[in-house]
Image (tube, rainbow, N blue to C red):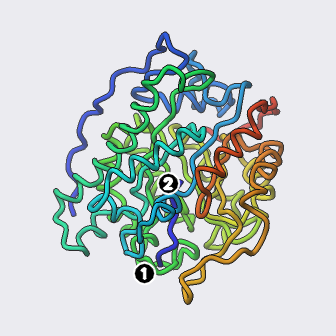
Amino acid sequence: MMCGRQFVGMGKARPRSTGPAVVEDTPGLCLGDGAAARYFATTFDCGTNRTPHPMPSLFTERSPLLLDGGVATALEAKGFDLDDPLWSARLLLEAPGAIREVHTDFLEAGADVIATVSYQASLPGFAARGIEREEGLRLLDLATQLAVEARDTFWAVPANRAGRERPLVAASVGPYGAYLANGSEYTGAYDVGRDGLYAFHRDRWHHFAASAADLIACETVPSVEEARVLLSLLEETPDTSAWISFSCPDGEHISDGTRIAEVAATCTTTPNLVALGVNCTKPRHIGSLIGEIRSATDLPIVVYPNAGEEYDASTRSWRTVENGGDALPDLARGWLDAGAAGVGGCCRVSPADIRMIRQTLADRVLRPRPTRPRLTS
């Protein structure tokens, strides 16, 4: 998935182009309006304000959900220099074929969800590069198109459908701090308030809500205020499914210092929020954070931490600070034991790492767990 290491008036949303969700003859599913929400809700009791659907779920007892890893990491491994305010979105302009290739690499490694390269792509960010609004919207469309094309091409091969559900495409939405590129996605110390955050996110959100993506992944969110803005946008688009994933400096808090259990309780009442999660966080904090989230909500939990390295901006290099990488498969088993329903990786987690996790979890099933009451208003 995506995270950041680089430190207008809303138009009417287009009608969604996909049709209703139906079960295919193949082991996969044809996704449509609300399909992702039904995937996440079918197996998990997410409260009385969520309606289960008699459709096979990605969260079945057969296996957990496997997310992709660091798309930028994979692009850098192919020789691309992403030292740019747009980060991996730069290649939407320069090498879109490489982006499609990386999506395919993660699918072949076993990922059930791939994220678009739009984490650091925003209309204000494009404007700072001299890119006009309409061209910026085209680039957002291209980010989705590349992921959908990679998924559909992969899924067209019968051998790739054996024992798997049809992978999902998540439109990656980075926080305001990713646009600032000053590290504030790890602090939440912004120069704007709620209205400014809403204005920043609004156009991109509504564009992705009308796109071919299956859901929106809000990633590396550092503050409860920004989470509330994203929830308000999700409420404006009731046919859109999304998850929100937070950056966390320790095992109890998100980056602005708010307890993650408090944030989870805040998020519980939004019907089309399909999961909560943690990403771009040190692996050692993940088990505790899962417990904190689980104490406040029965929403499915997705976790995709970094590989255990820190980025040194002064040397522009990574340094290892704890076990990760090769240890991720064993760590992932522990996170599932703690209550996670989906696991994956963020910065420095490669397709090879995701393949190792898939192999390690090949015989793993999600254990039934007791449900907790959730607020409905």
Which residue does the image show at 71% across and 60% down from the upper left? 325
From the top left corner, tell me how far across and down residue 173 is, in percent. Answer: 43, 56
Q: Nearer the viewer, residue 22 or 222?
A: 22
Tag 1 and tag 2, C-beta contact below 8 Å = no
Which residue does the image show at 46% across and 50% down from the upper left? 102
| Callout 1 amino acid | Asp
Report the disc number at residue 191.
Answer: 1
Mark 1 lies on a secondary structure that is loop
Q: Earlier in the sequence, mark 1 or mark 2?
A: 1
| Callout 2 amino acid | Cys
From the top left corner, tell me how far across and down residue 108 is, in percent. Answer: 55, 38
Relative to 80, residue 56 above or below: above
Relative to 61, residue 202 above or below: below
Residue under numbered circle 2: 218
Q: Is residue 236 visible?
A: yes
From the top left corner, tell me how far across and down residue 366 is, in percent. Answer: 77, 32
Which residue extends farthest front?
Answer: 79
- Mark 1 Cα shell of 10 Å, populated few (<14), some (14-19), many (≥20): few
- Distance between the Cα atoms at labels 1 and 2? 20 Å
Q: Which image quarter: residue 311?
A: bottom right
From the top left corner, tell me how far across and down residue 96 is, in percent. Answer: 32, 53
Which residue extends farthest top?
Answer: 25
Task: Choose mark 1 or mark 2, whichever is in front.
Answer: 2
Relative to 130, residue 47 above or below: above
Which residue does the image show at 80% across and 58% down from the upper left? 288
